[in-house]
Image: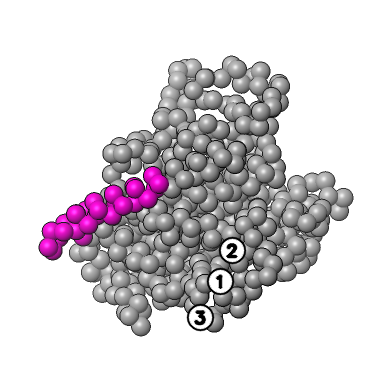
Amino acid sequence: KAEEGDDKADADDDDDDDGGAALPPAAKRRRPSKEKLEARVLHASAPPPHRRSRKHRLYQHPHRHDLDHLQQGASTPTSESKDDDGAEKTKAAPSWRKRRLLRHSIDEDESLLPFPRDAVGIYSCHGVEPLYDSDYENSQEDDDDQSPAESNGGGGNAAVTAKINQDRGGIAFPYGGCPRTALFAAYDGHGEGGEMVSQYALHEIQRRLEVHPEFGPGRDVAQAFKTTFVHVDECLQVEEEIEPLYAGTTACVCLLRGTKLSVANAGDSRAVLARRMEGDDAPFVPRDAATGAAEEGKDAGSAAAPKVRLAPFDLSVDQNPDSPGEKERIISAGGFVSPPPEPGLSARVWLDPTFTQIGLAMARSIGDHAVKAVGVISEPVVTHYDLTPRDEFMIVATDGVWEFIESAEAVDIVQGFLEKGLGASRACQGLIEAAAAKWHEYEGDYRDDITALVVRLDGIWDHGAKGKSGEGEGKGDGSAGEKKDEKKSEEEAAESKERSEEQAEKEERGLDL
């Protein structure tokens, strides 16, 4: 009830005036006297590399001229063309291409971030693929700084090259002009030019959703999500730099408003909630670290089983072509669905009965217009949840994480970092590195792009308030700054110890990511 009261009190702030006609006259008259809160936006970039990840080039940071620094608000790149006289002229890049990436440095101003790093982590890691002889010869002509080739670390002559990262991830807070509303999203682009589709969706869904007439509290936010996704998909056709016929993106977008969470999902990216289970709520069965299976001789009644654990709760469902409801829609629209060729692989959507045209591995997406006529839709599935004090954190990630890591294992990995006091950003990096290790184990020289967000839910609005240009810090008894410094020192010490332990373990076991 208290949350409902907060939402009602913030109703005027939440309503953006693209749907101004829906506001009562009194609200319209009051709006000019209120200062709208401006969202702080952060997009996923590569984590700071550890010594072991530098050695094997797990992350390759983009060039500085590709970055839009938070501090500087640098302009976006420009595209060049020629006028009728043959003279070069510049054309400003569209606003949706602008990226707000974090440059990892000790002087980074956290007040410019949506949330402190220990509260919310967001990172993205590019994929890799084998580098063949012809590709390697061509790569020698590239700029040395691009470092296109990297050793596979296996002692052989094979090499891999970094793929274009088609994943995107983003945070916006405060969102919709409300201090208790935030948006978290992950996008997985695919096809030639898929990175442009995911970048467009990243920017446009965030921009359009908050001004939708149904976005405000007490309105139909599910409808706002659905029409926004569909409109963004339709607008791809008029973008000069995007060809959406054979390129597309998934979209998993989470809107947190107070304690109410709405999740809109199209495709196979996923959001997972970690909920604290106590007593008899859920029996604890220890899992084997390698297989995820229950260990022999241990069950829920074991004396060694802890009384409290975190259990995964999927907030979204992967929309595969053979999923119930999805398959029927595709077939009724004239499409064809091939079954998974083997366990662990995906069913696919085809234009023809011989399974030779397209072969999309999802039933919903933004873009992929070549299969829109056969039942692949951009409308998301929207679900709503009321969070409780037992909900510890949320993970939002692309299938680079979920390909080889189940929801329960992902929760265990993040929980392990948080219990050591390392914070959400380090936990997010640890999850990405664990996923990368799985790809190397099962696929060798191929790895998909990996993007993840880790959101600590306990006291998240308090974190947000402190992160806003120093507000909420250094007030009262004057001890807030000292407590912050003390906490930061403890976190740095814990992270340093954890890195040393991990490094020693890796060297002893000879594990190579």
Labels 3, 2: front one: 3
Q: Going by the image, does 226 lie left or right of 159?
A: left
Label 3 amino acid? Gly
Say what secondary structure mark 3 lies in: loop
* Residue 77: quadrant of the picture: top left
The answer to the question of whether label 1 and label 2 lie on touching residues, with beta carbons closer than 8 A, is no
Q: Residues within 10 Å of mark 1 (few under 14, many from 20)?
A: few
Nearest to N terminus: mark 3 or mark 1: 3
Labels 1, 2: front one: 1
Is residue 234 something that shows in the picture?
no
Nearest to N terminus: mark 1 or mark 2: 1
Q: Going by the image, does 336 lie left or right of 213?
A: right
Q: Which dot marks residue 484?
A: none
The answer to the question of whether label 3 and label 2 lie on touching residues, with beta carbons closer than 8 A, is no
Task: Pick the residue in front: 468 or 438.
Answer: 438
Q: Position of residue 18 (x, y in %)?
A: 39, 61
Distance (Cα) linking label 1 and label 2 = 20 Å
The magenta region covers 469-497
Q: Position of residue 409 (x, y in %)?
A: 59, 59
Q: Going by the image, does 295 lie left or right of 330?
A: left
Instruction: Name the residue that disc number 2 marks.
Output: 408
The answer to the question of whether label 3 and label 1 lie on touching residues, with beta carbons closer than 8 A, is no
Instruction: Name the residue that disc number 1 marks.
Output: 304
Q: Name the magenta segment's main secondary structure.
A: helix
Residue drawn at the location 52% of the way across and 72% of the way down: 306
Q: Position of residue 498 (x, y in %)?
A: 43, 48
Residue drawn at the location 86% of the way across and 53% of the way down: 353
Give above or below for 84 relative to 108.
above
Is residue 335 something that shows in the picture?
yes
Q: Which dot marks residue 279?
A: 3
